[in-house]
């Protein structure tokens, strides 16, 4: 049920499992063998540990070797009562917690584990306060931001003069860390033929998703929900509810899980300088869907299911591998205004005054406004979803009035994808350009640029702001 990636290491000599367990005491364990309710009276997985040292537990039937857990026995005993004498195993790897974030690190020498919270606080399992979720009426919190992103956000605050710190959060080997944290819904043990998990924003459970995990699964993973929201769910076995509950999604960043596409995120969730929040589900940025990287039909369908009805392709036909003029991976059309192939290479602050860039930005903004007026959502991308995509994203975020910390972090989040390092240190020419225009705020200065240099109407600017902010 718990998903953990184990890193191969040298085998250690066989050793004897010999540890006393006290009756009816919750005991933190990490064993080099598979553990089940055949060995213990109760087993609990650790769903998450919050910043206060409270650990949320939920009942399970089995735990894989090397994964930390909590056990309870009804009568005092030792390991040798129910495991063989000698066990041989490799060193346990770090287990990332599915709910609040943070991680657990196993210690075979004592058969126990210690923890690290999302903020980097370290402690032993014995220091925690355990809270066992009610299987019949569960209530838990889940951060949708993965552990690397949460640490990046919590440990850094950017100003114009602050040096970039993002590189250390995607350390060697550089790999994809742009996958969001799923909501992991526990599945009680059952021998039923059909399992159904229903999720919704109200107790009627009719408006979000219905999933059908296999009977072998003990956790159902759900992606692409809205941060800072409450959801309800139930689990049915052959039509009968065997578990129900609610969960609360935390964090603000909404990375999108569509694994064949890199670097996708919703522009929603950022807080502006005047305390408003950008709405979710309207504008998405990411990597290409065809070309050097080809999206699966399933992942394109995922983006459409999130509300995408139009595409802006920021690639440049002068590069043959980017020449997809007239070809939308979504099947959208330039004829009806749902597809725009820009055929440009706009990404430097000095280019804001270039005639071609001004023409591109005007068409891009007007297409975004028209899409929003029609109740749709838009996806814009270049190849990697980095520089040209970041250029348009920053222009929109400037008009929305994001803080300096926010727009720099949004640009640097590309570092967590396969695109590699993107540093704020090479990005400062964009905000510096808008600072040459009159206005008390970044939003006002960007609006002045749009009116005077792009010919954007005040009506379109007002509509965009009223539609995108809450």
Image (cartoon, rainbow, N blue to C red):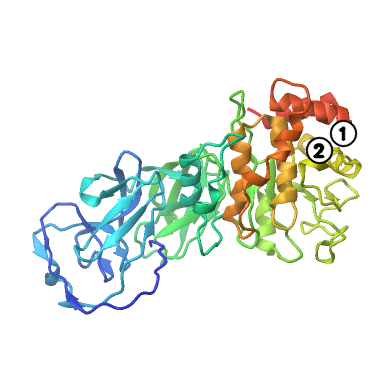
Q: Position of residue 35 (x, y in %)?
A: 26, 67
Q: Element under label 2?
A: helix
Is residue 463 at all visible to an observer of this figure? no
In the picture, measured across the screen, residue 8 lies left or right of residue 150, that is left
Residue 366 in which image quadrant = top right
Which residue shows up at 77% across the image and 59% down it? 329
Disc 1 marks which residue? 454
Is residue 390 shown left or right of residue 164? right
**Which residue extends farthest left?**
76
The residue at the point 46 percent across, 65 percent down is: 214
The residue wearing badge 2 is 365
Nearer-the-camera pick, 246 or 274: 274
Quarter of the image that includes the N terminus? bottom left
Give the x, y percent position of residue 465: 72, 28
SS assignment at label 1: helix
Q: Is the C terminus in the top left, top right, bottom left or bottom right quadrant?
A: top right
Residue 277 in the image: above or below residue 301 = above
Q: Are marks 2 and 1 in contact (CB under 8 Å)?
A: yes
Q: Where is residue 177 shown, x and y percent of the image?
A: 54, 56
């Amino acid at each position: 049920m718990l998903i953990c990636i184990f890193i191969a290491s040298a085998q250690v000599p066989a050793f004897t499992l010999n540890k006393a367990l006290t009756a009816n005491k919750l005991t933190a364990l990490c064993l080099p063998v598979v553990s089940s309710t055949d060995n213990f009276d109760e087993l609990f997985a650790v769903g998450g540990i919050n910043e206060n040292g409270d650990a949320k537990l939920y009942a399970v039937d089995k735990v894989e070797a090397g994964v930390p857990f909590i056990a309870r026995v009804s009568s005092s005993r030792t390991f040798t009562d129910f495991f063989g004498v000698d066990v041989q195993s490799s060193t346990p790897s770090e287990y990332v917690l599915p709910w609040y974030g943070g991680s657990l690190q196993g210690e075979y020498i004592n058969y126990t584990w210690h923890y690290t919270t999302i903020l980097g606080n370290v402690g032993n399992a014995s220091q925690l306060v355990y809270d066992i979720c009610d299987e019949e009426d569960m209530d838990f919190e889940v951060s949708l931001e993965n552990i690397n992103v949460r640490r990046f956000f919590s440990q850094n605050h950017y100003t114009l003069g602050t040096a970039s710190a993002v590189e250390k959060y995607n350390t060697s080997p550089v790999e994809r860390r742009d996958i969001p944290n799923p909501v992991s819904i526990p599945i009680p043990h059952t021998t039923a033929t059909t399992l159904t998990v229903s999720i919704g924003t109200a107790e009627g459970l009719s408006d979000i998703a219905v999933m059908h995990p296999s009977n072998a699964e003990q956790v159902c993973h759900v992606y692409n929900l809205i941060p800072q929201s409450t959801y309800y769910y139930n689990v049915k076995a052959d039509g009968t509810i065997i578990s129900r509950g609610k969960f609360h999604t935390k964090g603000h960043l909404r990375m999108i899980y569509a694994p064949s596409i890199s670097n996708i995120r919703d522009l929603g969730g950022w807080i502006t300088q005047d305390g408003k929040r950008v709405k979710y589900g309207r504008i998405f940025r990411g990597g290409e869907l065809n070309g050097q990287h080809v999206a699966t039909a399933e992942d394109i369908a995922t983006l459409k299911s999130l509300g995408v009805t139009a595409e802006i392709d920021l690639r440049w036909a002068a590069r043959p591998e980017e020449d997809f003029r007239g070809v939308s991976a979504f099947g959208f059309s330039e004829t009806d205004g749902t597809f725009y192939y820009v055929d440009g290479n706009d990404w430097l602050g000095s280019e804001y005054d270039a005639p071609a860039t001004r023409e591109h930005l005007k068409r891009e903004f007007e297409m975004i406004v028209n899409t929003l007026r029609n109740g749709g959502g838009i996806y814009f991308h270049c190849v990697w979803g980095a520089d040209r995509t970041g250029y348009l994203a920053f222009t929109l975020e400037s008009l929305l009035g994001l803080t300096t910390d926010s727009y720099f972090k949004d640009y640097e989040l590309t570092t967590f994808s396969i695109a590699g390092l993107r540093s704020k240190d090479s990005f400062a020419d964009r905000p510096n350009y808008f600072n040459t225009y009159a206005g008390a705020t970044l939003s006002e200065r960007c609006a002045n640029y749009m009116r005077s240099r792009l010919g954007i109407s005040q009506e379109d600017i007002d509509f965009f702001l009223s539609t995108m902010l809450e």
